[in-house]
Image (cartoon, helix red, strand yellow):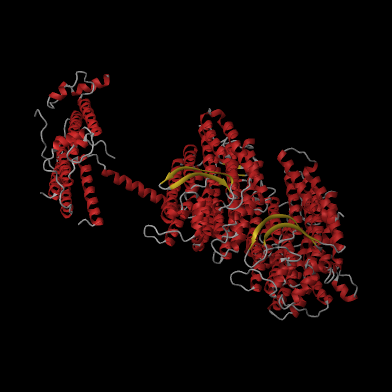
Amino acid sequence: MVGAFDYAPAIVLLPFLSFCLAVGVALSGRDLLPKGGALPGIAATAGSLLLSAWVFLTVSGGETYNETIYTWAAGGEATGSLSQPLELTFGLLLDPLSAMMLLIVSLVALLVHVFSLGYMNDEGETGLPRYYAGLGLFTASMLGFVVADNLLMAFMFFELVGLCSYLLIGFWFRQAGPPSAAKKAFLVTRFGDYFFLIGVVAVFATFGTAKFAGEGSFPRLAEAAIQGEATVNTFLGLAPTAWFTVVGLLVLGGVIGKSAQFPLHTWLPDAMEGPTPVSALIHAATMVAAGVYLVARMYGFYALSPTAMAVVALVGAFTALFAATMGLVKKEIKQVLAYSTISQYGYIMLGLGAGGYVAGTFHLLTHAFFKALLFLGAGSVIIAMHHNEDMWDMGGLKDRMPVTYYTFLAGSLALAGIVPFAGFWSKDEVLYEALVHGLGTTSGLGTALLVAYGMGLIAVLFTGFYTFRMVMLTFHGEPRTDTAREATEPGWNVKLPLVVLGILATTVGFVNMVPVKDLTGAEIDFLHKWLYGTEGAGWAETLGTSGYQYHHVLFADYGAGMAAANLPSYLVGLLSLALALFGAGSAYVLYGGADPDPYTDKLGVVKDVLYNNYYQDEYQVWLAEGVVLPLSKAADVFDQAVVDGVVNGVSSVSLFGGSRIKRIQDGIVTHYAAMLTLGLTALLVGFAIYGGWF
Amino acid sequence: MIIETLIGFTFVAALLTFLVPDEVANRVGAALSLVPLVGTLWMWTQFDGSGNALTGGTLAFETQFDLFALSGYQVQWFTGLDGISLPLVVLTAFLTTLAIVSAWTPIDSRQSQFYGLMLFMEANLLGMFTALDFFVWFVFWEATLLPMYFLIGVWGGPRRKYAAIKFFVYTNVASLLMFVGFVALTFGGLGDSIDTLSLPEVAMALDAGGNVSSFMGLAPGTLKLVAFLAMFVGFAVKVPVAPLHTWLPDAHVEAPTPASVMLAGVLLKMGTYAMLRFNFTMLPDVASDLAILIAALGAFSVIYGAILALAQEDLKRIVAYSSVSSMGYVLLGLIAFTEFGVAGATFQMIAHGLISGLMFMAVGVIYNTTHTRMVGDMSGLADRMPVTVGIFVAGAFGYMGLPLMAGFAGEYFIFVGSFHSTVIPSAPLFTAAAMFGIVIVAGYLLLAMQRTLFGPFSLDADYEVGAAPFHDVAPLAVLLLAVIALGVAPDLFFDMILNAIAPLVGGGA
Amino acid sequence: MVPVEYYLVLSAAVFSIGLYGLLTRENALLFLMSVELMLNAANINFVAFSLQWGNLTGQVMSLFVMGLAAAEVAVGIGIILVLYRNFKDVDVTVPQSMRW
Amino acid sequence: MVSRPELKEDTNYVNGLAASVLFVVLAAVFLTASFGESAGFPEDASLVAGIGYALMDLQSMAAVSVEGFLASFEIIGLVLVVATVAAVTLARRQGDSAGLSTALTDGGREEPRSSASDETEVEN
């Protein structure tokens, strides 16, 4: 029987096909396709969405898929203490997590393609085939990353999405800013990927396989190895647990780079130089999610190491707080959104690090929708404002563009975490998991989680504030410029994605209302059940990627060694809701007037520090331009002067020596004869001594 | 006899091209170079060898007959292909044809001599990669220098004489050192236990062990060490391994584009190929004794070359230094003595040959149009020559090791191989250090691209900049496709390479 | 019988005298004379060893050396004439154009 | 102005030292070597006849052992002829069609037409 899984490769291949088409059109240099290649892209992503939905339904039926479909390269002999030769393969892993992610990615991709009709085509941009080629390749790579069944394949597509990000950020290459931002984005994430690549190599060297799921997958091997039931290679004289922690942290390097976590977050705000739909698709909903998705994908591996979990949670929580503070003072709407994206991915990391596999995944899901919504809404505003992004030039857009306003408001409520919008449920669960596990766990991990919880909680306050500061400045009050006064709402191709995402941002949180479940006892935690499966049966058993498995490892002695305190989730939820409301309310009070003042200026030095992003960019630029470049110039001087100097010196010495020695040949016969005589004499003496004639 | 036919044909083709008038030489050269290309591709499809040529594997297209005796040693014409040499032979023929086509625009004087020399070089390279007798091999090895010397010295840039002489003298002195090392090892050390100079016989005699005698007061162990070092240094100049690399940037900067393509694409591989054949196959025990040094040299080359590339302002110099960096990976892979390490290194030779050829050609196309290669002299070229720039960007990402392109495959294999090497002490640390090259390479290529290709268009020269002609872009596109094909399906070559290196790995452990 | 060493020392002496002349004089004609001395030193050796080994070959050789000496003188005188014609002198240190 | 080449007396004794040194070394070598008793020739053998036979490759008729030198003999004859011709050729003034009589017989006298000979050279 031909099922959804047989068509699953087409999910990836369809957008790739649209990429090829668009490249062909771009090469031909003629306007062969209507809408500059948008239609094939829309068709392809729609096809992917349909197939993803089919896969999703099939997975709901309890079927999963975990097969290798192409062997990229295979070795011939086993290495070290392993029994199998290395095999580098491509394959599909379709389980609930990837099925969910497929839906998110293909849906957002489709909506962004549609939105691009309004944002790019209607604005008369040139180079559209290139744009749609980039989108197509990105969608294909991202979907390929999602369905990857092993770490190497994941890494490959991880890099490819980085390439697409580079190409799309630098779309307006004729200006000075975008190419620079694109370079920075690629370079900073490449720095993280460096560690990721070491991690991938280390995983292969350690386990001989990088499969995520199923029998003989590396998380399972790692679990068995710690319990002494399997042998793996470890390096540098480390015990398995320590070595796995090292490997996990190495892979985490890639996650930190891609998901814009501290200290590699600096590229994301700059990446806003790209077209806004690209920001929505790549730098909010999907590519940035690739990092945290990877953590969720190999959660069974991270769950083995309390240190790695603590690092994940702390990095996440710190980033959440850190980015939120910077979002407080930004002037440009996309900048606020960029920092909120960083902050929200911090929450997801916190959730995952705190042992909340479902919570982190849940926030990933809701965030993808409401952040895509916010970016697209911002895009709509930017169209109306003729590409002026300064919020202080806006104001009063509420009446001019109602669809944008209401959808944007829905997204903002979700972002701020106001009940009953999507973000409330997921953020609340993240914080809840951090708190109960922090209280329950006795080891250092517990303390770390409590600290992380504290930071996450404070960030809730800031999130509410900056979100509503943004809403107020943009949509409320009086218009502060002529452009804002004359703003008109763009066409259907902008509104349709907004509406779809607006509905989702409002409702998607209902799939996992844990506090309500705790209050009422109704079994409505659908996402939880979806990701957990049936314990000890079906895919949960064969793949080993279910919540049950992770829970088991997290709470095991050989794993992270967590324990949960007993706390009702609604109480914790109430606390964070109160903080969010307080933040949002103060923003409303401060900026709600007709002509709000720039209150944040009163923060003085603090505002400068925040506005300049804690001088993070400065120090990274200084590292690049103040350390590396001079170092390379010095190395160049050294190379030219010393290394090449020696080479040229040898040549000069030879030339000089030759020019001197040749003067022996002075043309006077007598001298030649004298030299012959002396030579003969010397030779004779030499032979005499050597041969013992005397 | 197919190999001999091809080599012979190419020599004749070189002569013919030399004699035709300048006006038609470009087309004649390209057409004639198709024959060895088709021939090698045919050999690829018909390849039936297995095992390593030097350890008694089955050779494909083998020919062997005696030529003459040299003081008791029989010199033979002995050619054949195994999984290591076949990819390099295909690479040679492939790149030569493309380089000849890429020469159509920039070479505007003495065309018949230029294309004749290119074909002459191809013939020698084919001979060098197929010969399995030391004497014949060495003749081809040395003879490749000659056409390159003239290509740089006649058609080169302003400092061509300096560059050509530096190239020739440096690499020739290195060859001398290598020659002395090999001769000391075989004539002095092996003495009567061999009666030909065929490389398999030498390798197997050495492998049998215990029959190296002392020579000139050097104990067998010391003799092997000295011979290893002499050969290693000799080949390291060719590779080039930092700090023996300084001839390379000068040669590349002065050489005309097609010569750069051949120099980076094929001639550098002679060094690592010979290292693999001589040092690592014949004297693996010495190699593993020196593993820490060689691995450190490899990692040093990677980082040092990359850092130097960061400081350059000349596009060709950037690519030249990045070649030093990329070839450092090969060295690291070879010394790993693991399956993926050695095979990956061999694969990386092919990958780097294609990608660096692509980059040099792309720089050449830009130079043809703008008449400058200095990064600061131009910006925003993407506006005027979109297709060329597109391919340049793709090639640059290939150089950075973008997955599904050949460079990533080679580098990844090497990393996996060297990470779990038991020969290199603390192998993971060395590997991680070398891997940092992938960050720096991204740094300098992205920086150069940002400054030259993007931003508002400007050019510090009075030239009309338009799209490049088709015959300039076509070789680029073909190379890019080849790079992607190898990246998606490395097994096109990787299988046969694995098969050929299998007898070597673990040899040092 | 006279030991062969004495002949050798004699020949060495004659040779060295010829060489001495060659090295100290600058006149080309004296050069020729000196060379003649050196050749005859060789002849002494030939004859001495002919006696030493009881073989006539050495003596035949000395005949040939004389013949060659004649040829050498013929050519040498010719060269000296050319030298004189070009430099108005027979001083061998004067022509110095064939240097580095 | 003398009419014949004068023998220069600007002797370079420093160079001569080299010859003296060589003599000392040679003498030292020879005197420390030992060759044993010399074989000598038979009392009644005719050495001159033996040489003659050797030159004609009739060594079997010689009383003392010797090798054949006919080829060398002929070659040396040829060399002498060549040397004579070479000497004459060298001695001829370039461009002097009058032959070699003057060159061989004027005793190295100053050539009055030396400057003119350059012109003849150009004319030819």
x, y percent for residue A604: 66, 67
Q: Which residue lies furthest to the left in this view?
A: D2
- Residue A342 percent across, percent down from the top left: 72, 63
Q: Which residue is drawn at 88% across and 63% down?
A: A61
Q: In this view, does C40 lie above or below A203?
A: above
User: Quadrant of the image for the N terminus of chain B?
Assistant: top right
The image shows residue B176 at horizontal and vertical percentages of 42, 49
Tell me where residue A656 appears, x and y as whole percent. Answer: 33, 47
Q: Nearer the viewer, residue B401 or A284?
A: B401
Answer left or right for D48 relative to B266. left
- Examine the rendered structure and indicate whether residue A493 appears above or below residue A85: above
Instruction: Assign the C terminus of chain B to one quadrant of the image.
Output: bottom right
Q: Residue at x 88, y 73 (%)?
A: A517
Which quadrant of the view contains residue A521? Answer: bottom right
Rendering quarter of residue A221:
bottom right
Left or right: A90 in relation to B438: right
Q: In which quarter of the image is residue A199?
A: bottom right
Q: Can residue A576 be seen in this view?
A: yes
